[in-house]
Amino acid sequence: MAVVSIREVVKEYRAQDAPVRALDGVSLEVEAGEFVSLVGRSGCGKTTLLNLAGAMDFPTAGRVVIDGEDTARLDDAALTALRRRKVGFVFQFFQLLPTLTAAENVELPLQLAGESDVRARALERLRLVEMESYADRFPHQLSGGQMQRVAIARSIVHGPKLLLADEPIGNLDSTSAEVVMQLLRRVADELGAAILMATHSLEAAKITDTLVRLRDGRIEERRRLGAAAERVPLG
Ligand SMILES: Nc1ncnc2c1ncn2[C@@H]1O[C@H](COP(=O)(O)OP(=O)(O)O)[C@@H](O)[C@H]1O
Ligand SMILES: [Mg+2]
């Protein structure tokens, strides 16, 4: 069973004059451990699709099923619980809280869910992204690439089945971008998360399993990128 299944989704936004059709019949599935890159020019619908995939927004038509749960059938409380347990997000501008240390930022989703053992679990995730020694630093004491690594640790601290990343390297230099891509690859391979990542970088997409190209709200191309052994390394 796919971790997320998007079925013939249409999304229209209300605008002043005519409605904007941001997605026009998109179907897409992402399996556990699969890393999918979503490419296409600005305005083609990438962010809209990620928001629907994470049940942050809802389609005008079509269905979104996350880990077997049809999001249209859930009430607000169930949706909040679903997002908290099963979905993680990574953003272009990191969205770390400036007044919290790296470790406290990573702990936050666990704190909000009322869980225990939060420090140990946060440190374990910081170790996975090789940022454990920066646990007590504040975001302004970190580079962009380091902030994104902390943000990745935060996005996976609760063990989500689905990770959504919107232009995660869009604000990074090429060296940091490569590190972040390798870490996302590790999240898919070692934690078995399904990852859907919007990116402008075809170079970055090479490390993913499947490339999906959107154009004007439709899927224009869908390509398997081969087994791990044949994957072209970044560089
Ligand atoms: N909240 C909104 N209200 C109205 N139109 C929107 C809204 N969000 C996105 N759009 C429009 O939907 C289309 C797709 O946008 P988006 O999903 O952000 O694309 P991308 O992430 O690929 O740049 C664009 O035409 C954009 O202007
Ligand atoms: Mg976008």
Image (spheres, rainbow, N blue to C red):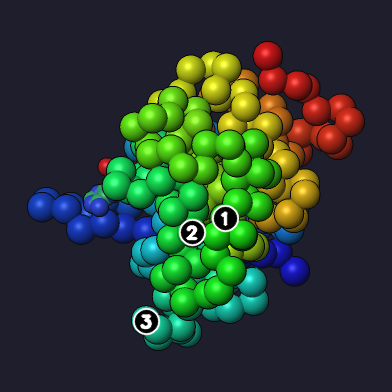
Helix, strand or loop at label 2? It is helix
Q: Amino acid under label 2?
A: Glu
Residue ID for mark 2: 107
Alpha carbon separation for disc pair 3 and 2: 24 Å
Mark pair 1, 2: CA separation: 5 Å
Q: Earlier in the sequence, mark 1 or mark 3?
A: 3
* Whole-percent x, y for residue 227 in the image: 86, 36
**Residue 208 versus residue 43: which sits nearer the camera?**
208
Instruction: Say if disc 1 is inside 8 Å of ligand 2.
Output: no
Q: Secondary structure at mark 1?
A: helix
Q: Earlier in the sequence, mark 3 or mark 2?
A: 3
- Where is residue 167 shown, x and y percent of the image? 46, 36
- Is 126 in front, or is 13? 126
- Where disc 3 sits, the SS reads helix
Mark 1 and mark 3 in contact? Answer it, CB < 8 Å: no
The relative height of residue 86 versus residue 155 in the rendered view (above or below) is below
Q: Residue at x 64, y 76 (%)?
A: 68
Query: Residue 76's mark?
Result: 3
**Between 76 and 114, the one nearer to me in the picture:** 114
Q: Which amino acid, mark 1?
A: Ala
Q: Residue furthest right?
A: 229
Residue 42 visible, this orientation: no
- Residue contact at pointers 1 and 2, CB within 8 angstroms: yes
Q: Quadrant of the N terminus?
A: bottom right
Q: Which residue is mark 1?
A: 122
Percent of width and height locating residue 159: 63, 62
Residue 169, compared with residue 163, is above or below; it is: above
Q: Residue at x 46, y 83 (%)?
A: 78
